[in-house]
Amino acid sequence: GYTVLGQAYAEVRITDQLFGAVGRKEYNTPYLNGNDSRMSPNTFEGLSLYGKTGGTASEPEWRYGGGYITKIKPRNSDDFISMAQAAGASVNRGVFAAGGNFARSQFSIGAMAYHSPDILDIAYTEAKYRLPLGRERELRLAAQFTDQRSTGDNLLTGKHFSTHQWGLKGDLELGAPMLTLAYTTVASGAEMRNPWSSYPGYTDVQVEGFNRARETALMLRAEYDFTRHGAPGLSAYALHVHGGGVRAPSYNENETDLNLQWAPKDGALRGLSVRLRYAYVKQRGGGDPNINDVRVILNYDFPER
């Protein structure tokens, strides 16, 4: 067990659409987020400024934010440690982060930058487009790109490194069912790093991230919502990811996931979420064993009213 005060912060409203915060807080950005897939999320210590403007029927919406994050509490830790130590360097350094998002009608594009002096630079951008196809039918397209590199005195590995990743994704919503096709590829320079977050790649699934150097991945996913069949809040999906491009001594791998979730939206059980997850990872080589991963997750969020 572990006990820690994960969140304790003060938030100041500067204007109706501009806020500042200082203290221990959750953040939700591509490479600095809660990674809340097990027991408790990452939380962070620092200060930040964030807000938005526009967003009316005749104006685009701009969302923006930035700050300096000094420490992170990893998911199952009692203590906050410096962001540099969490990345793997033996110094106390924080991370400067800044980003923004532009959205108008069916299109949005955003970018985030993270700078930890002498440790790591990360730049991320993503664009999305929604194409309505009729009643309860919609095609959603997305593209992402990440650039990562060492900086300054290269305190993370002792030498310079750089790499990048890009991905494409399409979601076809057909009412109750939804089909997803995604592809990602990583450059040969180094594996992708995500020391302060979950990995935001489109083919990051239950066990594997498919984010090693030279790794490519193709994902097929099918999801179904059973609300129209008298089971509101019940949904299920199955997916398969085929990875390739990794060189020896590592092995290429595939992963197949099954997920069943019930999250009632009304009634006495509103706020409850029950999730059953199974993953099977097959190593396409003779060195590493295959993996079976089973998770049962119960969450309850107290309703506001």
Image (tube, rainbow, N blue to C red):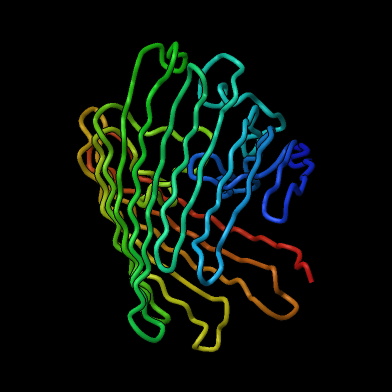
As rendered, which of 174 and 234 lies closer to the eye? 174
Asked whether, in this view, residue 283 is left or right of residue 305, the answer is left
Q: Which x, y percent locates residue 5? A: 78, 38
Quarter of the image where the N terminus is located: top right
Residue drawn 62% across the image and 35% down it: 67
Q: Which x, y percent locates residue 73? A: 66, 34
Q: Which x, y percent locates residue 94? A: 60, 24
Q: Which x, y percent locates residue 184? A: 29, 48
- Kindly tell me whether residue 1 is visible in this rendering: no
State the residue lying farthest toward the front.
Answer: 58
As rendered, which of 49 and 167 lies closer to the eye? 49
Asked if residue 69 is positioned above or below residue 26 in the image, the reply reads above
As rendered, which of 208 and 1 lies closer to the eye? 208
- Kindly tell me whether residue 96 is visible in this rendering: yes
Residue drawn 42% across the image and 58% down it: 108
Quarter of the figure with residue 290: top left
Asked if residue 282 is positioned above or below residue 77 in the image, the reply reads below
Residue drawn 39% across the image and 50% down it: 126
Quarter of the image where the C terminus is located: bottom right
Q: How many callouts does the rendering have?
A: 0
